[in-house]
Image (cartoon, grey):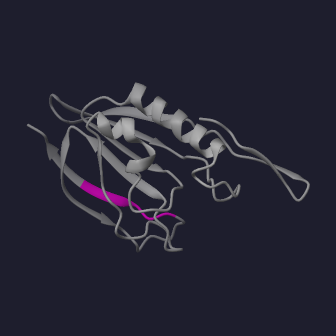
Amino acid sequence: TTRFNVVKDGELFQSKNGGLTTCIVEIQPGVRVQVLTFHMVPFHFFKFELSSKPALDVLNEVEKSLLSSVESPAIIQADFNIDCSTIREYFPKLFATGCDEIVQTDPTTPRGKCLDHFMYKGLIMESTRVIKQCLTDHFPIVAEFRENG
């Protein structure tokens, strides 16, 4: 994904590009699920609004990358660094292909933010929860699914 370069107080800050990691998990014989994860640029750190051109360029690039990578069934769980309950508005083409999401009603960080999001395709979600008892900067999101069909 795109890197941000920002000069703040005379110092250059550069976001990292962690890339997109994907694998296929065989959850039982003949049942395979694609799992994708990544870490999106923290727009808030660079003081960019999500409606700004640089942020929209990154969001479009991420969506394009996911559209070319996601198979079905799939799970996408990532630190999107978007503090909201739903990310549907930022990835309309991806959701148009049949992706759904776990709407975050609980914070995913100890600071009360919902930065981590969980999308899925070709599966039916049975349950979900955020584990807040972890001593980390982001809480795990645990979800259980069943096959769609």
Q: Quadrant of residue 29?
A: top left
Front in this rendered view, residue 27 or 145: 145
The range drawn in magenta is: 138-143
Q: Quadrant of residue 139?
A: bottom left
Q: Quadrant of the C terminus?
A: top left
Q: Does residue 141 sit above or below 23 in this rendering?
A: below
Q: Does residue 8 sit above or below 129 in this rendering?
A: above
Q: Does residue 68 sit above or below 118 in this rendering?
A: above
Q: Quadrant of the N terminus?
A: top right
Residue 94, position in %: x, y? 36, 37
Residue at image position (70%, 58%) is 47
Residue 58, position in %: x, y? 58, 39
Q: Is residue 4 left or right of residue 36?
A: right
Residue 108, position in %: x, y? 44, 66
Residue 13, position in %: x, y? 79, 50
Identify the residue at the far left of this view: 149
> Residue 112: within the magenta?
no
Residue at image position (45%, 42%) is 37
Residue at image position (54%, 46%) is 39
Labels in figure, total: 0
Q: Is residue 37 left or right of residue 122?
A: right
Q: Is residue 20 left or right of residue 148?
A: right
Q: Is residue 1 left or right of residue 7?
A: left
Identify the residue at the far top of this view: 68
